[in-house]
Image (cartoon, rainbow, N blue to C red):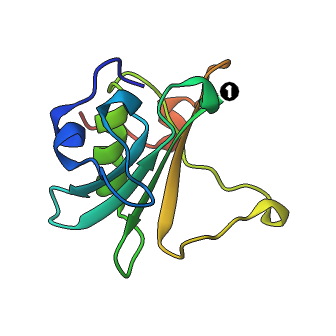
């Protein structure tokens, strides 16, 4: 995760109530963000502190629907640098957890490199 808290997170941190935190939590906490799509996103981050164990984690939910790929990419780029790899997972069904029907998660392991397939396996690169 980024070393500095982006301004969009500083300005949109939930500071009171059950999910409230202050700036001392760095990247950990709950945030209400307006995506470039105009959607209000509820975002919760584990941050980079000692409670992360071996994973960094961000959850993203939208009202009445799952976040789009573009919204998830936008959130990923707020918390991680563009050159860092992070992932969404499809675990075995026996390990599903569903606290919110419209919530998706971004994960990044701290002690290993995420393997990725060769770009040509995905499709032609246009950029």
Residue, far front:
17
Quarter of the picture containing the C terminus is: top left
Q: Residues within 10 Å of mark 1 (few under 14, many from 20)?
A: few
Closer to us: 48 or 123: 48
Query: Residue 60 is drawn in which quadrant?
Result: bottom left
Query: Residue 72 versus residue 25: which sits nearer the camera?
Result: 25
- Left or right relative to 4: residue 83: right
The image position of residue 77, as x and y in percent, is 31, 36
Figure check: 19 above or below 75: below
Eyeballing the image, is 112 above or below 39?
A: above
Residue at position x 16%, y 43% from top? 11
Q: Nearer the viewer, residue 5 or 87?
A: 5
Is 112 left or right of 34, judged from the image as shown?
right
At x 60%, y 24%, the residue is 50
Q: Residue at x 51, y 39 (%)?
A: 46
Residue 105 location (% of width, % of height): 52, 52
Q: Position of residue 121 (x, y in %)?
A: 54, 38
From the viewer's side, name the closer residue of 125 and 103. 103
Rendered location of residue 39, percent (x, y): 22, 67
Residue 115 in sight here: no
Quarter containing the N terminus: top left
Q: Which residue is mark 1?
A: 54
Work out which residue is located at the far right of the displayed protein and give it: 94
Task: Answer above or below: position of 59 versus 123.
Answer: below
Q: Secondary structure at mark 1?
A: loop
Residue at image position (54%, 72%) is 100
Q: Which quarter of the picture shows residue 124?
A: top left
Q: Is residue 11 visible?
A: yes
Location of residue 56 by image quarter: top right
Task: Give the total number of marks visible in the rendering.
Answer: 1
> Is 1 above or below relative to 120?
above
């Amino acid at each position: 995760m980024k070393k500095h808290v982006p301004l969009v997170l500083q300005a949109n941190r939930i500071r009171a109530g059950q999910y409230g935190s202050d700036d001392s939590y760095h990247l950990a906490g709950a945030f209400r963000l307006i995506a470039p799509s105009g959607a209000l996103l509820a975002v919760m981050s584990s941050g980079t502190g000692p409670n992360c164990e071996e994973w960094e984690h961000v959850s993203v939910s939208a009202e009445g629907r799952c976040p789009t790929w573009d919204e998830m990419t936008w959130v990923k780029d707020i918390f991680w640098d563009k050159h860092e790899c992070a992932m969404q997972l499809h675990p075995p069904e026996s390990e599903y957890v569903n606290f919110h029907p419209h919530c998706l998660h971004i994960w990044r392991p701290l002690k290993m490199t995420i393997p990725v397939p060769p770009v040509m396996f995905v499709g032609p690169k246009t950029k």
